């Protein structure tokens, strides 16, 4: 039996990878993928803790997160396509006109 | 019944104010005249019923106006003998002036005509409230109301700047006096716990007269007197009255000669008991009165505007009334008020007829020789002038001599000096009045004077017209007229700007009947009005004095025996006999003075005009001083108006308003916008930065919960 700590550590590593991806990558699609990684890191810890506590709550929340993530991916990709059509680039630094 | 007296003119005001625009002249003028004549009839009936009832006063309470703790102020009117005389003057002379106005103002448009009559009726209503009010606040309502109407009527031709300015000046100067009046009123309430005239008089009678020191009654009466100096144009607040001549002439006659300006005298008479207990105030009243009389008399001697001469004469005569009040001769003061109302209204209306005939000319240097064109005006004017000069057996003679005699025999400190000044003033009065008569009506027609200093009184519409016709003719004819012009010269003034249409000849025309009849009635009044007060010395019994006496005593309401007034009046019968010789001597002296004044005027301005020019140039500085009215206007301007303007502009406007208030408001705005300018730098627009901020925030919150 794999102990709970291993799951949590793996989850933390995945979350860190996702966070780094969000902040460091220069491609909006990669940023979206990194967000998915962060979400899945959280899903992993939910499921692991649910299993550890003998409850199904973790799995239920995970299903919710997956549904929302699917919707988010759809909207996010649609935005990315619209943005690309607009500026011919996917670097987030190109989209800074929403300021003073 | 009493309520109807002020109410009738008020109803006339309401009709003309709200419906006047749609009424024709004859209807709006008729309503106004009916209202005031109705008020006169009601006054006569009320007075007759008062006299037949034998009571000292009759009163009517309309409703409780203010009721708060100790302060009970009913809206109450009280008719006593003093008020009777005043309402007869106000409604009687008021009626005549209303009738005169229907002729004088005939060239105004319909709405203007109705506006004029609505103001005139409103004035009459307020004046009657002032006179009939049974307590200080009700009197004050009338007091302020007549001030308002005075402002409205002085500025009646408000498109003319000088008229609008004169209205404002009158209002502001009066406001200063009113401030004193309010303070005096408050002090009276604090001291006596009542504002009703009779109760105050009764309470004051309980006290000993305040001798020497500055007691509360002295201060209260002085404050009230400040109000009187404003309303009745005494030093130092007289400056508004000469400027008030910008108003239509009937207004000058009604408000600025016969009624409103005498309100201060009336107020002192109304509070005679109170003033009697403040000898210091009385001495000040007498001194100010006599100083005003002399000063205004000297100014009147050199003025060239017919109405201004009369205005200074009014100020001077008001000074006489205050002198009478100040020496305790209340009945004599009120008597002079009453006779003065007749002859001064007559003189003003006569000057109005002259101005009307000459299409707005007011400069007496441009008049002369009008006697043959305006016979009715001339003769009535002469009667008025004789009356004011104190010509024997005319009304002014009786009242003025009563004042002079009472001043001579008074026990006020300095009464002989007052008497001497009053006699000199009486000489001046006779001189300047007959200067006016001779320059206006006698001699040759002149139009060679320099342009008038003051804008002519004229309907704004016709000003341009009259001047347009005037200017070229002036240049062409001037030299010829200056030397010797045959009498019926074509007057450039006569024909133009008068709106009588074609066929109007160029000679001055006599007043229409609506103007002539009041003149004649007032002339009759100026002759006979004095016979109610024939002094003992001439075999009369001075009925007006015994008639008015109850109003000056406190006993009426409370039944207290009054100390001071009773004492001063009690010796009257015995003293009268002893003084008959003195009185006759003084009378002969003042008759001599009056005749001398008329003679001087005849010598200087009719027989021998060269002499006057010689004197004028010999005493040029004095002449200039008088012509410029002792530079009092300039002095006030420099001492009060300019500093106030400077403080207002420099400190209040630029300092407090623009600096402090605007500064605070703008400062708050600037601070917010400055903060915004700084804070907007946070809004970079970079998604990465926002994400980092979000992340950092989440981490911080997490850290806070984990490690605290």
Image: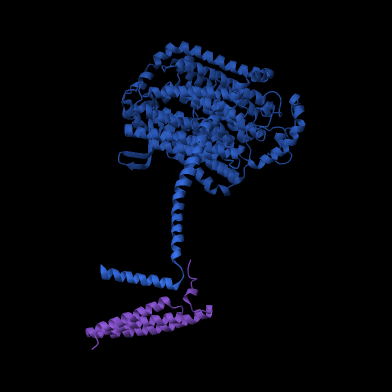
- The residue depicted at 41 percent of the width and 31 percent of the height is B224
Position in image of residue B603 (x %, y %): 65, 17
Position in image of residue B258 (x %, y %): 52, 31
Tell me where residue A68 sits by quadrant.
bottom left
Chain B palette colour: blue
Tell me where residue A14 sits by quadrant.
bottom left
Q: In the image, is residue B210 above or below residue B640?
A: above
Q: In the image, is residue B584 above or below residue A49?
A: above
Tell me where residue B380 sits by quadrant.
top right
Closer to the camera, B171 or A50?
A: A50
Quarter of the image with the C terminus of chain B is bottom left
Could you tell me how many numbered marks the image carries?
0
The residue lying furthest to the bottom in this view is A1
Chain A palette colour: purple
Q: In the image, is residue B163 above or below residue B669?
A: above
Q: Is residue B41 visible?
A: no
Closer to the camera, B1 or B227?
A: B227
Position in image of residue B75 (x %, y %): 38, 40
């Amino acid at each position: 039996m794999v102990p709970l700590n291993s799951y949590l550590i793996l989850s933390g590593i995945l979350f860190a990878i996702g966070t780094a991806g969000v902040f460091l990558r220069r491609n909006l699609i990669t940023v979206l993928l990194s967000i998915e990684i962060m979400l899945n890191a959280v899903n992993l810890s939910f499921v692991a803790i649910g299993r550890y506590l003998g409850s199904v709550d973790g799995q239920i929340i995970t299903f919710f997160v997956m549904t929302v993530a699917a919707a988010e991916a759809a909207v996010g990709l649609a935005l990315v396509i619209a943005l690309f059509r607009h500026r011919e680039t996917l670097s987030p630094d190109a989209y800074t006109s929403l300021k003073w | 019944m009493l309520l109807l007296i002020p109410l009738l003119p008020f109803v006339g005001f309401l009709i003309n104010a709200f419906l006047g625009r749609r009424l024709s002249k004859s209807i709006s003028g008729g309503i106004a005249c009916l209202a005031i004549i109705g008020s006169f009839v009601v006054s006569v009936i009320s007075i007759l019923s008062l006299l037949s009832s034998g009571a000292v006063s009759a009163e009517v309470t309309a409703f409780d106006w203010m009721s708060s703790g100790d302060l009970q102020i009913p809206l109450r009117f009280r008719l006593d003998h003093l008020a009777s005389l005043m309402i007869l003057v106000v409604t009687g002379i008021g009626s005549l002036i209303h009738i005169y106005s229907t002729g004088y103002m005939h060239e105004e448009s319909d709405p203007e005509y109705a506006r004029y009559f609505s103001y005139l009726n409103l004035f009459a209503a307020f004046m009657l409230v002032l006179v009939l009010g049974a307590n200080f606040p009700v009197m004050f309502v009338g007091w302020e109301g007549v001030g308002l109407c005075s402002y409205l009527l002085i500025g009646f031709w408000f498109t003319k700047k000088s008229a609008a300015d004169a209205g404002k000046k009158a209002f502001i100067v009066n406001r200063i006096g009113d401030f004193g009046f309010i303070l005096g009123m408050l002090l009276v309430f604090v001291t006596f716990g009542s504002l009703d005239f009779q109760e105050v008089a009764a309470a004051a009678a309980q006290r000993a007269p305040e001798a020497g020191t500055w007691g509360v009654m002295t201060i209260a009466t002085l404050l009230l007197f400040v109000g009187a100096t404003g309303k009745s144009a005494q030093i130092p607040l007289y400056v508004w009255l000469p400027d008030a001549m910008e108003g239509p002439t009937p207004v000058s006659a009604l408000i600025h000669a016969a009624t409103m300006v005498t309100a201060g005298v009336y107020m002192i008479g109304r509070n005679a008991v109170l003033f009697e207990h403040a000898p210091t105030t009385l001495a000040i009243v007498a001194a100010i009165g006599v100083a005003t009389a002399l000063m205004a008399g000297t100014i009147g001697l050199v003025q060239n505007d017919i109405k201004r001469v009369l205005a200074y004469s009014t100020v001077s005569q008001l000074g006489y009334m205050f002198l009478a009040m100040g020496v305790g001769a209340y009945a004599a003061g009120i008597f002079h008020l009453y006779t003065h109302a007749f002859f001064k209204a007559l003189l003003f209306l006569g000057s109005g007829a002259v101005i009307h005939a000459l299409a707005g000319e007011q400069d007496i240097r441009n008049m002369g020789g009008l006697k043959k064109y305006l016979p009715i005006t001339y003769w009535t004017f002469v009667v008025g002038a004789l009356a004011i000069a104190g010509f024997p057996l005319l009304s002014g003679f009786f009242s003025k001599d009563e004042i002079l005699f009472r001043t001579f025999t008074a026990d006020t400190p300095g009464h002989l000096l007052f008497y001497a000044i009053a006699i000199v003033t009486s000489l001046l009065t006779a001189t300047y009045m007959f200067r006016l008569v001779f320059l206006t009506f006698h001699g040759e027609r002149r139009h060679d004077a320099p342009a008038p200093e003051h804008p002519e009184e004229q309907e704004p519409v016709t000003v341009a017209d009259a001047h347009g016709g005037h200017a070229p003719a002036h240049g062409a004819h001037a030299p010829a007229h200056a030397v010797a012009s045959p009498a019926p010269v074509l007057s450039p003034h006569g024909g133009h700007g008068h709106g009588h249409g074609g066929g109007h000849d160029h000679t001055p025309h006599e007043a229409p009947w609506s103007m002539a009849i009041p003149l004649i009635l007032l002339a009759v009044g100026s002759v006979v009005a004095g016979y109610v007060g024939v002094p003992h010395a001439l075999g009369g019994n001075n009925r007006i004095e015994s008639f008015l006496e109850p109003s000056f005593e406190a006993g009426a309401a409370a039944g207290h025996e009054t100390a001071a007034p009773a004492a001063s009046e009690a010796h009257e019968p015995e003293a009268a006999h002893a003084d008959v010789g003195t009185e006759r001597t003084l009378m002969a002296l003042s008759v001599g003075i009056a005749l001398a004044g008329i003679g001087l005027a005849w010598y200087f301005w009719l027989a021998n005009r060269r002499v006057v020019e010689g004197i004028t140039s010999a005493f040029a500085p004095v002449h200039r001083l008088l012509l410029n009215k002792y530079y009092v206007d300039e002095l006030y301007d420099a001492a009060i108006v300019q500093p106030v303007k400077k403080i207002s502009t420099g400190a209040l406007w630029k300092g407090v308003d623009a600096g402090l208030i605007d500064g605070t408001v703008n400062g708050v705005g600037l601070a917010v916008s400055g903060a915004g300018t700084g804070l907007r730098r946070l809004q970079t627009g970079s998604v990465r930065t926002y994400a980092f901020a979000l992340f950092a925030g989440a981490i911080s919150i997490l850290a806070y919960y984990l490690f605290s």
